[in-house]
Image (spheres, coloured by chain):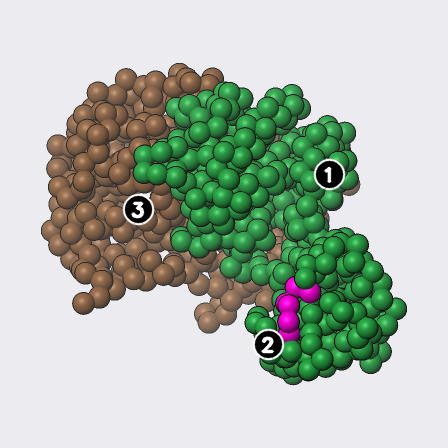
Chain colours: A green, B brown
């Protein structure tokens, strides 16, 4: 546990105040041309502008200088967990994201369906991107064929298209290691690789993985396209101090996409049901309103600001920011004592990917030193009174502004 | 020892230059209403303004983001000691604050006089707040009754009102542990609790504490009001690398209140005599002037900027800032090579308590990059060229500006 989190844990106190942390996924951007506007600057955001004028602004670096955060590290940092210390494998993230409860000692693995030729040479590492329905059908067949290997329970879950997740359940009191080489050679025209353990505690897991590959190929041998499996991204189960314990908060997650729900549940937040499809902003506001009395802390996730950036669609990212702006008054109506607006990383349309650029942080509370910011933009945030900070500073600042931290030392 | 302090120690060199660090206790503030002035901004401070115009400004976070520093951690940070690493208990602080020299292995404990009924039930945890004279009288009685327990020398010191300090002196080469549960139940209508050791090294100390409680009650049994003792805040003696050694400085403390003198003596500064009562600003200036030739470094403490903030008295805090401003020319007359003005934490009148908000730092030296600051205020400091920094950065910056640090590496 990082010193700051440990220190905050010892100082946290229960109060009536409520904290709302809005994560606009990938909200930070870049201008397309020198001197141009970023997506935030280009957006018409009267509500965010008014909010910025009564808030404190700053910039947040989620992992470190020049480091582009994945969604996991970006969120962990916002939740106060040093992402260089708390590492969550993609397999574990996928598993918890689809609602699978992982226990200490288990191993979760991400799998891809692949197309193999009769000599086991890989023709397509994604098996022609099968439909989700086909995925479910294949997973059902695999479940029937492989429920356990060598006495170890094996669980297989559908994710989407060519993606699935396998969980190997450790026997009570035992630990399966996750230090195993990839089955996926990341190329075609070669055979799947044999998994090799990287340490003695992973010997058994490697054997399980190799047995799974062999038995899956037998079970799927009459399939023309989805007839092989590839693995990479093995994760053992990370041990997180509970968010609720660390901060003395009852905490709820309002998100639609599996990974974000998974991250929140990994740190022990309650994941609330959200009505609707995709980003489901209305459903999220409804979930927030209905549960407002029940929790001290809400993590409210908005996804589309990221996906439009990943698509390289500047105008559409601007539009998604404006959609959030339209929804903002409904959040303000609930009168959170502390409201934060922040991103888990930047996703500039210009780069079509996550990026290392710090994200703008806005904190509104009764106890801030107000800035002279006119808007919630990268440029205004850079001049803001909160300065340029680490992502792990965000939670202590929110706790302080909510008057939920005792003094440190006499 | 923090890395920075260790590094600075290796680079420090003796020169003729003099550093004056003025700590305006709790000087950072908040506006009462959005867009309003903080206490510093509201104060009429022509001398500070002129100084700011030829200085560098920045903001300092003493312990960490969102963390509200106690006076101990705040000062230690300013002196260059990472307050998350160097922890001083309240008992040790009280003891050294009244001039008691603690040795390695000793334990210092804070005590309160209490009023007990015939069944030892606590009627008043502060014994009706006796006068300081009564406190001295009781301490004198206790000293006569308890000079040693089980061969361990026991020293009893008066603090004020219901407060006193006990020091258990460890035999040569031995260590008394300080991991003991409280005697003070922090409530009335119940008996004082029996101290329980939390580890084997504290077994003996717990027995000493329990014996002290019993013997004190016997010694005070004919007292109607001050007839019991409660303990909490046990401290062993922290081991600080000496300030003088770390920085190669002869260092003096000019402060009036026990805790600040205690902190300075803990790190090995000479504590100068200050004539006068309470904050005694004139006496402090006199002490500074008289000792100016004798030291390289002066820590000059101004208390009332904090106490007025704690009282929630915005106007009076403004006034205390203005009083310091009036005194400032006398400090400047001494021509310190490096002058710093900083706080050990913020104490906004609005919060009536210490707070987490960064404090403005001003450094005047011949070798700064000047800012365009017009005043010493939170807002100007936030725009300042020194940026937002940790408290432990202050000493290295002062040493550098005094040309007292050699180059790091070839």
**Callout 1: chain:** A
Subunit under mark 2:
A
Q: Which residue is mark 3?
A: B394
> Which residue in the protein does label 1 denote?
A277
Which residue carries the number 2 mark? A189
Q: Residue at x 66, y 51 (%)?
A: A259
How far separated are the C-alphas under marks 1 and 3? 53 Å
Is disc 1 surrounded by few (<14), some (14 to 19) or many (20+) residues within 10 Å?
Answer: few
Is label 1 or label 2 in front? 2
Task: Please tell me whether residue A123 belongs to the stretch shown in magenta.
Answer: yes
SS at badge 1: loop
The one nearer the camera, A168 or B94, is: A168
Question: Mark 2 to mark 3: distance in Å?
Answer: 61 Å
Residue displayed at 34% across by 24% down: B40
Give the secondary structure at mark 2.
loop
Q: Disc 1 vs disc 2: Cβ atoms closer than 8 Å?
A: no
Which residue is more in the foreground, B33 or B266? Answer: B33
**Residues drawn in magenta:** A122-127
């Amino acid at each position: 546990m990082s010193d700051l989190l440990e220190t905050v844990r010892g100082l946290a106190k229960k109060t009536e105040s409520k904290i709302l942390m809005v994560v606009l996924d990938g909200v930070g951007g870049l201008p397309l041309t020198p001197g141009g506007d970023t997506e935030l600057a280009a957006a018409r955001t009267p509500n965010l502008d008014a909010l910025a004028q009564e808030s404190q602004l700053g910039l947040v670096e989620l992992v470190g200088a020049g480091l582009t955060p994945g969604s996991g590290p970006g969120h962990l940092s916002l939740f106060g967990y040093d992402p260089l210390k708390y590492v969550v494998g993609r397999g574990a993230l996928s598993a918890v994201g689809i609602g699978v409860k992982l226990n200490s000692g288990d191993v979760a693995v991400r799998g891809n369906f692949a197309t193999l030729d009769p000599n086991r040479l890989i023709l397509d590492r994604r098996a022609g991107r099968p439909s989700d329905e086909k995925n479910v059908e294949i997973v059902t067949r695999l479940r029937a064929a492989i429920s356990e290997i060598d006495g170890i329970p094996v669980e297989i879950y559908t994710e989407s298209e060519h993606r699935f997740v396998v969980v190997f359940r450790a026997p009570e009191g035992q630990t399966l290691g996750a230090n195993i080489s990839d089955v996926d050679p990341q190329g075609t025209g070669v055979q799947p690789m044999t998994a090799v353990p990287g340490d003695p505690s992973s010997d058994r897991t490697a054997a399980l993985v190799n047995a799974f590959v062999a038995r899956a190929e037998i079970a799927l041998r009459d399939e023309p396209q989805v007839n092989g499996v590839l693995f990479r991204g093995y994760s053992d189960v990370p041990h997180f101090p509970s968010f609720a314990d660390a901060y003395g908060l009852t905490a709820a997650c309002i998100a639609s996409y599996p990974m974000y729900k998974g991250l929140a549940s990994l740190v022990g937040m309650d994941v609330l049901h959200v009505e609707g499809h995709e980003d489901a902003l209305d459903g999220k506001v409804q979930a927030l309103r209905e549960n407002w009395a029940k929790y001290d802390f809400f993590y409210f996730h908005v996804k589309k600001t990221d996906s439009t950036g990943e698509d390289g669609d500047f105008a559409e990212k601007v539009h998604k920011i404006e959609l959030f702006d339209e929804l903002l008054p409904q959040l303000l109506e609930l009168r959170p004592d502390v409201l934060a607006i922040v991103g888990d990383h930047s996703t500039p349309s210009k780069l079509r990917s996550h990026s290392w650029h710090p994200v703008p942080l806005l904190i509104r509370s009764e106890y801030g030193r107000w800035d002279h910011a006119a808007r919630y933009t990268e440029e205004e945030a850079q001049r803001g009174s909160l300065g340029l900070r680490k992502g792990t500073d965000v939670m202590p600042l929110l706790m302080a502004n909510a008057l939920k931290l005792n003094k440190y030392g006499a």
